Amino acid sequence: MTVRERHVRTRLLPPLGGDAPGLLLAALGVAAALAVHQAVPAVPKLTAAVVLGVGAAHLPGLRPVVRGVARPGLSTAGKRLMRIGIVLLGLKLSLGDVLGLGWATVAMVLAVVAATFAGTWWLGRRLGLPGDQPLLVATGYSICGASAIGAVSQAAGSDEEDAAASVALVTLCGTLAIAVLPLLQHPLGLGEAEFGRWVGASVHDVGQVVATAQTGGAGALREAVLVKLMRVMLLAPLVAGVVVAVRRSRAGRGEGGGKAAARPPIVPLFVAGFLAMIVLRTTGVLPDRALTLAADAQELLLAAALFGLGSAVHLPTLLRTGGRIALLGLASWVMIAGVSYAGVLITT
């Protein structure tokens, strides 16, 4: 091959660098997650993506790639693709559907979210979990699992390992809910609608809610999705509250000058996009085909983001706080299940 031919080939096929290797690996991870879901439909795609990401980070053959050349792209997937996915998540929400649940259910959901968030955050601090883990675990349990953790970690500037450990814990407990909650429906005396509302108020991720509620019938699934999406709506005010707290914390530490100029906006751009998509969905101008395509794109983007976050999990580090974070996860799981069960009984 001549020098000119090599030059032309280099221009047409530039060597992979920057984000490309990591994004390619994330795409392969999404394809593998889809295959797992096809083979075992009970396993949600997003759950499979997180688990595969953790596995890729610890397989001897892939570990050097994940920690080396692929790390920038995987981090980009965990951050930027997560933001885009959260924006598209807004298209699943309609103000009319949520208000149709009734004010009693709205009050119940607000109480469940507030109690779970405050209780989990307080207990995580008492257990001495490092960094932003108490905040992120509280967010994931109270709002919408990994998506909420991604949004709040972006707003707070959290460490990637804190976000990854929190995602791993919330994903594990949400996956266990798929098997455990259907077994409790009849012993707890819950009808189809009541079971759906309990699942929607207590299970973390939207995909896990669907997988759990569908065991109770079509009515249970509808109620679960509506209640769950109402919890998702609370993501925007929670992120705004976190940003305000971050600003005050920086001011209390006397961080001025350049850092003050770079302080995060109260409503980050991706949260504003999330709210805009809710308004757009409420107008009814989008055809069903567009909503379906957006839902598919949102799931693929979140799967890639969760694969990226999963690949940042370092199990030896996680095991050093494993007992404490597992205790927090169990306590928070019992808390949200108990509070939401009481709320469903009171409001039905």
Image (cartoon, rainbow, N blue to C red):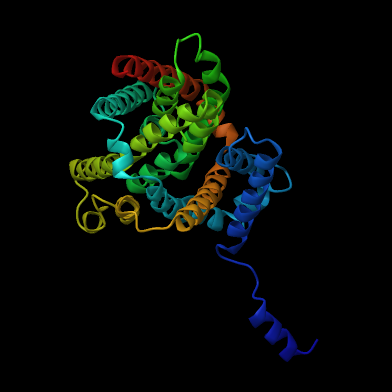
Residue at (68, 42) in percent of width and height? 38
Q: Residue at x 68, y 35 (%)?
A: 40
| Residue 124, quarter of the rendered image | top left
As drawn, 202 above or below 229: above
Pinpoint residue 342: horizontal percent, then vertical percent: 34, 14
Q: Is residue 136 left or right of residue 253?
A: right
State whether residue 141 is above or below residue 338: below
Is residue 242 visible in this depiction of the protein? yes
From the viewer's side, name the closer residue of 258 and 283.
283
**Hey, which quadrant is residue 240 in on the image?**
top left
Of 265 and 283, the residue lying toward us: 283
Q: Residue at x 62, y 34 (%)?
A: 43
Q: The N terminus lies in which quarter of the figure?
A: bottom right
The foreground one among 35 and 265 is 35
Q: Residue furthest right?
A: 1
Q: Position of residue 92 (x, y in %)?
A: 41, 46
Assign the C terminus to one quadrant of the image: top left
Counting from the top left corner in percent of width and height, residue 330 is at 47, 19
Q: Identify which residue, 38 or 314, lies in the foreground.
A: 38
